Image (cartoon, rainbow, N blue to C red):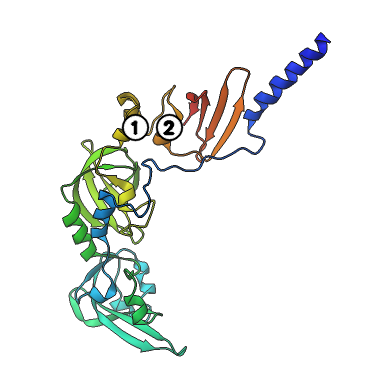
């Protein structure tokens, strides 16, 4: 009978520890924002400021409104224009008005008219297969492969000189090449310049160590790269008073340390792709795995081993 009991103990211990192998299906942690998002209908200082940095609807455009070209593919927009008239990357085009065009489908198309800056003679026409009334009812109308310079000037006046905390470590250098920065650090806005067609606004800032850029969308509903999800007027550390200054400094650098909590590691590295759970006779285990191959191993909620 003692022999049989010994076998049962071994089998029980093995089955518990094998849960940690990750072979079986395990739950996944959902991504949690570093700063917990408030309800969409709740105004914050950041969302209120973002409302001042949105593009104007088409009926409010005035002649001469300027757009800088960000990509030579703009030739696809003005593909009926002679090649010697086509704008190229870095050129500026100016809004000159619109025309309504009937279409064979018994609906209306719209021609948005532009000229190249310094050349008011030749007209560039961007055909939109929508009636003007449809375009006029939209919050904004995007001109592909361009950045609205009027919007850039507006954001520059709004943000220049402001001190804020940046919530992302996804920075850009002054050549607009992606680089790794620090997060949750106070920065001072030095300038606002045109970005890309995807993220048209580039905020140039100094974080007391170096000058860098953050690129974001003017669409305040854009969750990941909108202004309100990238900047905070209040120190994020205040939301986590239990985190020591030493651990917070590591979090700002995107680093982890032995005996960090799960919340501290999530703040530093973000939510993992997968989580495996397990238990031995004395401890509860978790293994967090990231898409880049990094992993963290926790025992009873504290980080004990990792590979970055």
Nearer-the-camera pick, 172 or 108: 108
> Which residue sits furthest top?
2
Vertical side of 41 occupied by 86: above or below: below
Q: Where is residue 13 in the image (x, y as percent from the top left)?
A: 69, 20
Few, some or many residues within 10 Å of mark 1 (<14, 14–19, 20+): few
Residue carrying label 2: 263
Q: Which mark is residue 240?
A: 1
- Identity of the residue drawn at 36% across and 52% down: 225
Nearer-the-camera pick, 209 or 58: 58
Q: Which mark is residue 94?
A: none
Few, some or many residues within 10 Å of mark 2 (<14, 14–19, 20+): some
Q: Is residue 252 visible?
A: yes
Q: Helix or strand or loop: what does disc 2 sit on?
A: helix
Kindly indicate the quadrant of the structure image that contains residue 75: bottom left
- Identity of the residue drawn at 28% across and 71% down: 57
Inter-mark Cα distance, 2 to 1: 10 Å
Vertical side of 134 occupied by 202: above or below: above
Tag 2 near tag 1, CB within 8 Å? yes
Query: Which mark sits nearer the N-terminus, 2 or 1?
Result: 1
Kindly indicate the quadrant of the structure image that contains residue 188: top left
Q: Position of residue 11 (x, y in %)?
A: 74, 21
Q: How many labels does the image show?
A: 2
């Amino acid at each position: 009978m003692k022999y049989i009991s010994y076998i049962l103990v071994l089998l029980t211990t093995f089955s518990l520890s094998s849960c940690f192998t990750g072979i079986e299906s395990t739950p996944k942690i959902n991504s949690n924002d570093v700063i917990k998002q408030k309800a969409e209908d709740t105004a914050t200082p950041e969302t209120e400021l973002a409302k001042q940095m949105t593009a104007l609807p088409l009926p409010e455009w005035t002649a001469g409104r300027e757009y800088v070209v960000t990509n030579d593919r703009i030739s696809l927009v003005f593909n009926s224009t002679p090649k010697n008239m086509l704008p190229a990357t870095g050129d500026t085009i100016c809004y000159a008005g619109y025309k309504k065009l009937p279409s064979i489908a018994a609906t209306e198309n719209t021609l948005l008219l532009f000229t190249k800056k310094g050349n008011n003679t030749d007209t560039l026409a961007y055909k939109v297969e929508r009636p003007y009334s449809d375009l006029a009812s939209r919050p904004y109308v995007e001109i592909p492969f361009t950045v609205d310079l009027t919007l850039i000037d507006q954001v520059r006046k709004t943000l220049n000189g402001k001190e804020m905390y940046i919530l992302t470590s996804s920075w850009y250098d002054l050549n607009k090449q992606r680089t790794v920065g620090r997060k949750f650090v106070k920065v001072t806005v030095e300038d606002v310049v045109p970005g890309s067609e995807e993220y048209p606004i580039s905020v140039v800032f100094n974080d007391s160590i170096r000058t860098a850029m953050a690129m974001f969308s003017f669409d305040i509903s854009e969750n990941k790269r909108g202004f309100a999800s990238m900047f905070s007027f209040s120190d994020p550390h205040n939301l986590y008073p239990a985190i020591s200054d030493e651990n917070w400094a590591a979090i700002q650098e995107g680093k982890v340390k032995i005996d960090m909590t799960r919340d501290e590691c999530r703040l530093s590295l973000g939510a993992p792709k997968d989580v495996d759970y397990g238990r031995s006779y004395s401890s509860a285990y978790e293994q967090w795995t990231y898409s880049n191959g990094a992993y963290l191993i926790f025992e009873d909620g504290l980080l004990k081993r990792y590979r970055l």
